Amino acid sequence: MDIREDLRTRLAWDLVYRLETLTDDERRSALLQRASDKGIPLSAEVTNWMFNYYARDMSALSSLLDALDRYSLAEKRSITVPLLKSYLQSRHS
């Protein structure tokens, strides 16, 4: 940006945060924590499937978890790999 030097230095005084990309273990831990916070029991089998066959970004994983929560309540079933596959199939039908 083409701005005055005194303005540039004032703007540079603000806090700067560096965002780091999460590792797979950190993503898995964050997903399990989110599920726990929502009271959703999530097995290692389900999280392993999600990490092997679904997008690994936190936004997609969080959205999937929220959708699975709603779907499992509607179907009156706990979240399992078969329910996860059923949900994903229903989205594409």
Image (tube, grey):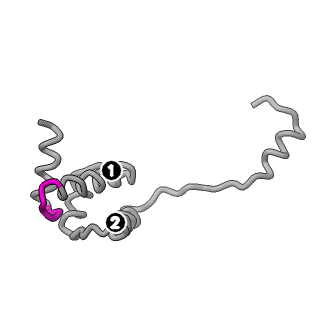
Q: Is residue 64 left or right of residue 49?
A: right
Numbered label attached to residue 37: none
Q: Residue at x 37, y 51 (%)?
A: 57
From the top left corner, tell me how far across and down residue 11 is, in percent: 79, 45
Numbered label attached to residue 38: 2
Q: Is residue 82 left or right of residue 13?
A: left
Q: Residue at x 15, y 49 (%)?
A: 87
Q: Residues within 10 Å of mark 1 (few under 14, many from 20)?
A: few
The magenta region covers: 74-80
Q: Is residue 2 above or below residue 80?
A: above
Corner quadrant of residue 41: bottom left
Disc 1 target residue: 63
Q: Is residue 48 above or below residue 93?
A: below
Q: Nearer the viewer, residue 34 or 1?
A: 34
Amino acid residing under circle 2:
Lys
Quarter of the image with the C terminus is top left
Q: Residues within 10 Å of mark 2 (few under 14, many from 20)?
A: few
Q: Residue at x 38, y 62 (%)?
A: 27
